[in-house]
Amino acid sequence: MHDIPLGSTSVFPFLMVDALDHITGKTGLTPTVKISKNGAAGASPVGAVAEIDATNMPGWYKLTPDPADTGTLGALLLHASAAGADPVDQEWQVVAYNPGDAAGLGLTRLDAAMSSRAATGAAMTLTGGERTSIAAAVEAALLNEGDGSAVQQALVDKINATDTNLAGLTLSAIAQAVRDVAIAGAAANSLGALVSSIYARLGAPAGASMSADIALLLVDLLLVKAKTDQLTYTKTGEVDANAQSMNDAPILGNGTPGNLWRG
């Protein structure tokens, strides 16, 4: 199956062979040809059917189609028959482009001169409407709208900035814009507001930083743990102890009813 452009008048060649040996090309025929356009019922073509060359190309015939024969997009079927020859069936696909057009396939929307292409290395300048469209697309596709996050909004604001030249839209500039808005904490759910809330609850660090305070606290906790690890609990909730004195006096007795502890 081959693609042919809509309205093509290029010939459709087909071979008819002898019905006895199914090999030898049959000459001198007047084939009856029917075509079907995009699944429609078969009908005689408007174009002419003729033998190509009985001497040098025996058995080959052609349909030279009228534009009406190829004026419907989709499958184009051909059925040819003649007395003494095997019937022939062929198929083509009528398409909206031109496979024979090496320059642009007959596509009208291609700019052959590429006049709209920016020069290599040139900065792209967008109109206000284009910047707004980009910002809206980024916000809708990449950001979670409605969460009140000023950090997320910073990227959109940078793209939709007053400056029409995107040369300044670098990763560094975007990161700085995000950081500035995050620390400012303008929105209730922003990173800046969250950091401020945590800081207010924890208070200012006593040392050089909060991490330094935590490190000192960890040292103290390890010292306490070292002591408490020495305690034993024979009975749950009660500490085992070996007391030697009471009120600065030696402990006497053994705790029995007749020999109570005393000191």
Image: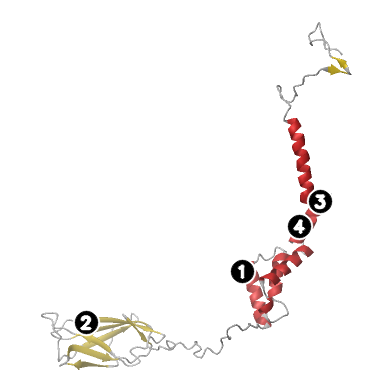
Residue at mark 3 to residue at mark 1: CA–CA distance = 36 Å
Q: Is residue 142 left or right of residue 30?
A: right
Residue that badge 4 annotates: 194
Residue drawn at (76%, 38%) of the image: 221
Residue at mark 1 to residue at mark 2: CA–CA distance = 55 Å
Q: Position of residue 154 (x, y in %)?
A: 71, 69
Q: Is residue 205 left or right of residue 63?
A: right
Q: Secondary structure at mark 1?
A: helix
Q: Position of residue 100 (x, y in %)?
A: 37, 88
Residue at mark 3 to residue at mark 2: CA–CA distance = 89 Å
Q: For the residue carrying disc 3, how many other residues have a C-alpha within 10 Å: few (<14), some (14-19), or many (20+)?
A: few
Mark 1 or mark 2, which has the lower sequence index? 2
Mark 2 or mark 4, which has the lower sequence index? 2
Q: For the residue carrying disc 4, how many other residues have a C-alpha within 10 Å: few (<14), some (14-19), or many (20+)?
A: some
Residue at mark 2 to residue at mark 4: CA–CA distance = 79 Å
Q: Is residue 189 left or right of residue 18?
A: right
Q: Amino acid at mark 1?
A: Ala
Q: For the residue carrying disc 2, how many other residues have a C-alpha within 10 Å: few (<14), some (14-19), or many (20+)?
A: some
Q: Amino acid at mark 2?
A: Val
Q: Nearer the viewer, mark 1 or mark 2?
A: 1
Q: Is residue 147 above or below residue 167?
A: above
Q: Amino acid at mark 4?
A: Leu
Q: Is residue 215 above or below residue 53?
A: above
Residue drawn at (74%, 34%) of the image: 225
- Residue nearest the viewer, comparing 165 with 57: 165
Labels 1 and 2 touching (C-beta < 8 A): no
Residue that badge 3 annotates: 201
